[in-house]
Amino acid sequence: MNKPIRNLAVAALVLFAALLVNINIVQFVQAESLNDRNGNQRVINEEFSRDRGAILVAGEPVAESVPTDGQFRFQREYPAAELYAPVTGYFSYIYGRGALENSQNRVLAGTDNRLFVNRVVDLLGNKQPQGGSVELTIDPLAQRTAASGLAALGENTKGAVVALDPQTGAVLAMVTQPSYDPNRLASHDFGSVNDAWQELTNDDDQPMLNRGTQQTLPPGSVFKLVTAAAAMEELDLDPDSDVQGGTTLSFPGIDYELPNQGGGNCGGNEISLRQALEVSCNVSFGDLAGEVGQEALAEQAERFGFGQDALSGLATSESRFTAEGTDLEAPQLAQSGIGQFEVAATPLQMAMVAAGIANEGEVMRPYIVDTVRSPNLRVLEETSPESLSGAMTEGNARQLASMMVSTVDSGTGTPAQIPGVDVGGKTGTAQSTPDRPPYAWFVAFAPQDDPQIAIAVVVESSDTARSDIAGGRLAGPIARDVMQAVLER
């Protein structure tokens, strides 16, 4: 064989080998990811003709497939559409899947490897494969109560509520307003689906945004809980320790003063840490932030979950103490200590802060999927509570929790009082830009001796007059009602 023919033969063998390698990569290595990819039309055609599994809350479907006589054999339906849309997401022929419909797709579609035996049985019985079900941790009464609380503030309200079980991390409620109707995207009338998608995605109010996990906002004074925790951990302070009070906090050599909300003096030039939290004293916590220092305060925030993607199954945005690489000057650090400047947090994150304090300093990893089952109800997976981090020592957490109870008993958090229950809470009114109203925050837990719920409520905007916007006034009653719903179940 002459040299040119030999080289051509070698090249052909190399190309053939490369083709075999590529086929194996596509069919075995990449097969699962290709099948899971949104927009894979062949897979979508199969899924739309299949009995997709249900997403359940307290045993009742919040997403299910029902038989239809149309082009496809089943129609996806959402019985309590807007109430659970941020959690369930959507299942659309044109636009794919969102939220849990996407992250739990393999189980719901029946293609999960753990359902292999079920698929074989269906094949032998000449039946279409059937999907498994996903049971959520959501408390339906808490969910409805949270939605009603936001709705009561008016149709122009934007906000979110996230509630957790402090001892396990289970999500008890996750509500955003405005929300959307995923039935419009699941329709088999594709023209209507396209119109709905364009309307929803072009809406300035972003109804498809899960404000509980995806939107970060300045937390304002609810972040003072993180600053208080850092002061107790780093400076060995306790509730009776003296801290700086007064009307303003000044910075040597810098022409800037940090004032208190409303211009008060917090009760004196020297007050206790407990009183500082009760009256939400900017001067106290701005000064403490400087004493603790940027590095230690950032580390304290991280121990509560800042900078981490802690919740699986739903799209989340990481909360931040400050932008990476920023070296804060004294006034900026003071502003950060009261939850302003570059501090930004999701409601989920601030619920984790309250939960960690309530749970004696241990922050549990939040989760929303409780149990995954096969079509014959065999348990495939059950979530076990998992610790995310130790944010505080047990003793300091108990003392900070008692300070939060004092804040609800006789401080700025009185709107969250529940008769006969020791409720711990903290208000926050975060400034934004001059041309928009402040953000109203409230975080809380109850009861003190055996915490069953920790909650964060944020009202981003509403029809409330700017002068009447305050965390306790707007968000506090919502937190109270949701906590009551859980405690009385």
Image (cartoon, helix red, strand yellow):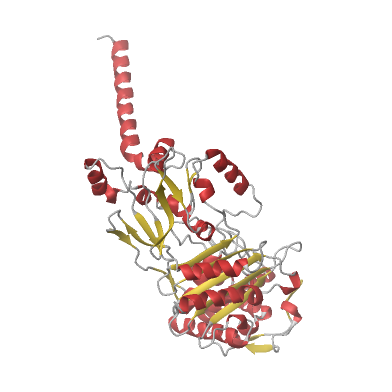
In front: 319, or 5? 319
Instruction: Give the total number of marks visible in the rendering.
Output: 0
Relative placement, left or right, of 314 versus 25 is right
**Residue 289 percent across, percent down from the top left:** 61, 75
Quadrant for the N terminus in the image: top left
Most distant residue in the front direction: 69
Most distant residue in the right direction: 255
**Residue 236 percent across, percent down from the top left:** 52, 84
- State the image quarter where residue 156 is shown: bottom right
**Residue 110 percent across, percent down from the top left:** 33, 48
Whether residue 372 is situated above or below residue 167 in the rendered picture: above
In front: 271, or 250? 271
Most distant residue in the top direction: 2
At horizontal 65% and vertical 70% (from top left) the residue drawn is: 440
Whether residue 40 is situated above or below residue 337 in the rendered picture: above
Residue 306 visible in rendering: no
- State the image quarter where residue 42 is shown: top left
At horizontal 43% and vertical 42% (from top left) the residue drawn is: 37
Relative placement, left or right, of 432 versus 213 is right
Quadrant for the C terminus in the image: bottom left
In front: 324, or 420? 420
In front: 426, or 102? 102
Residue 219 visible in rendering: yes
**Residue 480 percent across, percent down from the top left:** 56, 77
